[in-house]
Image (cartoon, rainbow, N blue to C red):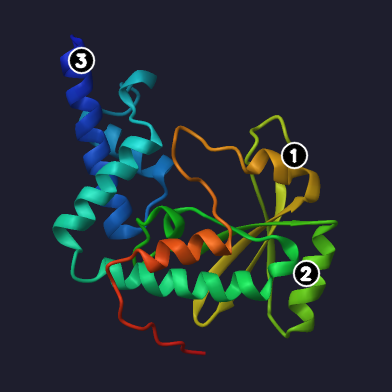
Amino acid sequence: MIPKSIDDLQQLRAQIAALAARMVAQDGADYAVAKRKAASQLVGDGAALANVLPDDTEIEDEVRRYQALFQGDTQPARLLRLRTIALQVMDALAEFKPYLTGPVLNGTAGEHDDIHLQLFAESAKEVQIFLLDKNVEIEISETPHFKGARYDPVETVSFMWHKEGVHAELYELNDLRGALKPREGRMVRADAATLRELMAASPVTESTEDNE
């Protein structure tokens, strides 16, 4: 079903965003996967046009609405735990200029989410050696560069910290300047000081238990 008017298009985009948000909030689905699956269910395979798909900002807004309606008794405490652990990791990795990104930063993190960091160092090996010296088991993968597809993917180290998954993208120091530019008026990364401010402003005040 292809929308025949602007109003129909906007309504369909909203429906796709709402269904995708439910998949994200309930199952931890990736935004790109969720929007394609939602479009397939509502429009049909191969029928969805590019302008029918909502952008990530629309889905994020719908995730917030869904969590407020259906996960208000659990999601805030889960977010606080992840932010608390993220701050611990960032303090431990302070020499590598850590920045928090993703759902833990924007406040939509749920039970399926991990902690996502961006580190800036002279070399990726420095971070790997630092973690190995702390007896932290790491897995190495690649993540697309935040500057876009024309840049090479960056090495990413993944590890567990207090039973929570952490994925740290390893950038060069000269990438830091571009990383600090805001995008679409929304905060896309935050240092430890900014994270502390967010936590201080959180309505959830109970302590988070640190489980090794």
- Residue that carries the numbered disc 2 in the rendered image: 128
Amino acid type at image mark 3: Pro
Q: Are marks 1 and 2 in contact (CB under 8 Å)?
A: no
Is 108 left or right of 134, judged from the image as shown? left
Tell me the tag on residue 12.
none
Judged from the image, the secondary structure of the residue bearing numbered disc 1 is loop
Q: Residues within 10 Å of mark 3 (few under 14, many from 20)?
A: some
The kind of residue on which mark 1 rests is Asp
Give residue 152's mark: 1
Residue 11 visible in this rendered orientation of the protein:
yes
Q: Quick check: 91 above or below 193?
A: below
Q: Give the farthest residue toward the top.
A: 4
Q: Is residue 114 visible?
A: no
Q: Nearer the viewer, residue 127 or 30?
A: 127
Residue 3 appears in which quarter of the rendering?
Answer: top left
In whole angstroms, how far apart are the C-alphas of marks 1 and 2?
A: 19 Å
Q: Residue at x 25, y 34 (%)?
A: 16
N-term-proximal mark, 3 vs 2: 3
